[in-house]
Image (cartoon, grey):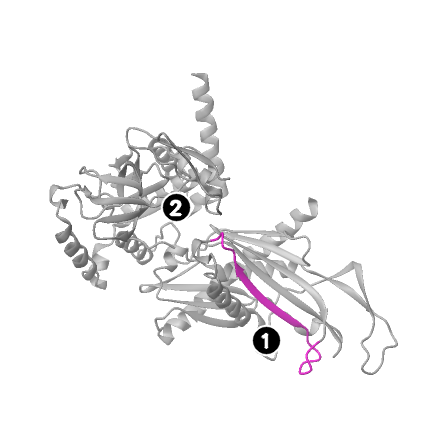
Amino acid sequence: MGPLRSMGKLLRRFAASSRESISWFMYKPEVGDIIVGRVIEVAPKRWRVEINYSHDAVLMLSSMNLPDGIQAEVRGFQHDGLHLQARSQKYGKLGRGQLLTVPSYLVKRRKQHFHHLENYGIDLILGCNGFIWVGKRVEVTDDMVVDPKSGQDGFKADKNSFSPEDQEKNYTPQQTRESVCRTANAIRVLSTLGFNITVEVIMETVDLSSSINVAIHEMLGAEFCVLVAEKEAVRRSMTKKK
Amino acid sequence: MVGLSIGEKHFIQGGIAQDIRSDGRKRLTPRPINVKTGVISQANGSARVRMGATDVIASVKAELGRPTALQPDKGKVFINVDCSPTAAPMFEGRGGEELSAELSVALRHCLLGGKSGSGAGIELSSLVVVEGKICWDLYIDGLVVSSDGNLLDALGAAIKAALSNTGIPRVNVAAGASGDEQPEVDVSDEEFLQFDTSKVPVIVTLTKVGKHYIVDATSEEESQMSSAVSISVNRQGHICGLTKRGGAGLDPSIILDMVSVAKTVSEQLINTLDSQIAAAEAGEDES
């Protein structure tokens, strides 16, 4: 007897294996979700993407415009699993930054999942599957659209250019990196406290931490957690009054 | 550990070069450490140590045994580590065995000293009850509950905490046994002897990524390492053991550098650990 889960109009019973027993905390995909995933297998016609779900998703090469993608939209379920699509300009490969994993129920489905925080120069993508991307701002340009073949070449050239000297030149600027780490730690704090993660709350937490001069790594400490929790309590009592 | 994308790898390496790691720490800043003692009631001593998402449990079980013929005046200590399959998907089935064996060997090197038992962090001669006939065998078991890098340091800290939590029952030996006869013993249920753990070293692992080395690496950072050196240092600042992992070679001058860095880091680690252990013991007594 495994847990029951509705998938579209289809009810399926999953085997109660060790992996499934934690599945209640796992992401339940819905059509139209914006997700962040990690490509774990490249096959000639399709990519297999890890999306924090008991099954890996499939991204068909026919379902996208970009050569490389770890950010996509749930297209639908088919007999061989979960299918993704990445047809629009806004989907694509994620550059430099870090991927965080939070419980997926903390990320609510909203109109906006892509955020560009202009004053910090960073990109923030809240994937519905609980993967959150925080990275350096990447400009979306038309010349990113290349056919898969030349994309592969570009990928290799990218790898070869990683000589130590080049690397040092290409490092993310100090300030951007600080903002990325600060934002990431704000998300970690919110996720350990179990608060809903929205761009507003993240920014408030970031501002709070910089206003009281907490060092970035101290944000994960107990004292700052208490401050964030207090702030959340104030916010909740405010919304109740209204 | 899933493979990271090129962008992420680059971000981690750049962060270490710029002295801001992914969670905002500096290269030589460890994660906060959390110690809980007495977590397993059946064991003589136990402790659970958490550093970030790394979570390990160590337990000490004492049993009466016979000393070996070669060292009649010394007790025996066995260290064994297990990786729980729930810690990471790669530990499922037999996947964790290799890592478990590696960790056990490294811990033995770092804590038990030479084959003869000299230089051990745990005073082996204090484990003898009747010379040549009865001694205590200590079984130290480590369990990796959740893995986010730096397992060896966490296990070392957990073992130190577990040992300071350990009470060895007092043994009364019945007089009158002579010759080859095994004397009769009476193990007390009430009186326990505390261990002297001031000599037990802590382990500091320095992971080399790019040109720099870092302490307390997360598993993401460990995936980018070229080599790692684990140095066990005791309270006096003496090196008790040294092991190296990873394929890449190291320049001797870097190793000397690492040793002196490990010495300073270990001082802080011993102090935090001691205060954490004291706090944990105090909390345990109250409850």
Return the mark for residue A216.
Answer: 2
Give the percent coordinates (x, y) of residue A23.
45, 41
| Residue identified by numbered label 1 | B119
Q: For the view shown, which residue lies furthest in the top direction?
A: A242
Residue A182 lies in quadrant: top left
Q: For the view shown, which residue lies furthest in the left direction?
A: A143
Residue at 68 percent across and 76 percent down: it is B74
Q: Nearer the viewer, residue B157 or A125?
A: A125
Residue at 18 percent across and 37 percent down: it is A88
- Which quadrant holds the N terminus of chain B? bottom left
- Is A233 drawn above or below residue B137 in the view shown? above
Q: Does dot 1 land on a helix, a strand or a loop? A: loop
Magenta span: B67-87
Give the percent coordinates (x, y) of residue B261.
44, 65
Let me know if residue B42 appears in the view: yes
Disc 1 residue type (three-letter): Gly
Residue at 12 percent across and 47 percent down: it is A146
Let me know if residue A120 appears in the view: no
Give the percent coordinates (x, y) of residue A108.
37, 31
Gap between marks 1 and 2, in whole Å? Answer: 41 Å
Disc 2 residue type (three-letter): Ile
Residue B111 placement, left or right of B186: left
